[in-house]
Amino acid sequence: MSKVYTDMNLFARADIQLFYWLFNKTAGRNCTPIRWISRTGDGHLYLLLGLILWMFEPTHGDLFLYTALLAYALELPIYVVLKKLFKRTRPCDLLRNFSAHISPSDKFSLPSGHTAAAFLMASLIAHYYPGFTLLVYTWAATIGLSRVLLGVHYPSDILAGASLGLTISLFSLSLLA
């Protein structure tokens, strides 16, 4: 057996163990607050925030909206391609004797789209409105964690999503900011 294969197996086992450890924190608990946090990453708030800033914030509002629109126009197709390329089965569909707290929106788990979008938005907000940096990155990380706690993503899906969102945000900022 090759070292790369062995290392990948170790990584996959560690990812699954961390998933179970985190998910089991929700056993027998009311997950309504976790579902609510996850829903804040569905995308509706991003557009609403962009439009509000565009209409009412004269310093950076328009540039924020344009950068966000460019970033999401790039992120979404890349996210879809990565999902179809990796075809990683979600924990709720792969693991035995397991039931997620929500139904996932699509079949595959890598990368986490909610996390990608949240970190993309957090990065843009932190760039244009640095006073909110700690708040928005905490919010983005909480969205990512919620996806694991709800049983629809592995921790590595969250890391991949955060990396995707941050990369696309930085690229978009380099073009427009």
Image (cartoon, rainbow, N blue to C red):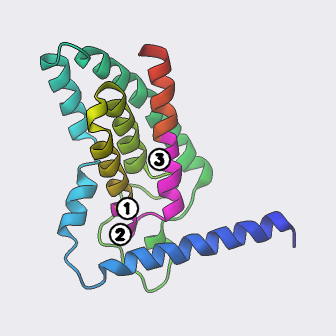
Give the residues in magenta: 146-164
Circle 2: element type: helix
Q: CA distance from mark 1 to mark 2?
A: 6 Å
> Is disc 3 surrounded by few (<14), some (14 to 19) or many (20+) residues within 10 Å?
many
Asked whether 109 or 19 is in front, the reply is 19
Q: How many marks?
A: 3
- Badge 1 amino acid: Leu
Earlier residue among tags 2 and 3: 2
- Residue name at image x 34 percent, y 39 percent: 122
- Residue name at image x 37 percent, y 53 percent: 141
Residue 121: where, in percent of width, then height? 34, 36
Residue 155 seen by the camera: yes
Q: Name the quarter where the N terminus is drawn.
A: bottom right
Residue 146: where, in percent of width, then height? 33, 62
Q: Which mark is residue 162?
A: 3
| Left or right, 3 with reference to 113 | right
The verdict on residue 156 being magenta is yes
| Left or right, 85 with reference to 23 | right
Earlier residue among tags 1 and 3: 1
Q: CA distance from mark 2 to mark 3?
A: 16 Å
The verdict on residue 1 being magenta is no
- Badge 2 amino acid: Leu
Q: Name the quarter where the C terminus is drawn.
A: top left
| In contact (CB < 8 Å): disc 1 and disc 2 | yes
Q: Which mark is residue 149?
A: 2
- Badge 3 amino acid: Ala
> Is disc 2 surrounded by few (<14), some (14 to 19) or many (20+) residues within 10 Å?
many
Q: Is residue 67 above or below residue 6?
A: above
| In contact (CB < 8 Å): disc 2 and disc 3 | no
Q: Which residue does the numbered mark 1 point to in the structure image?
A: 145
Q: Is residue 155 above or below residue 21?
A: above
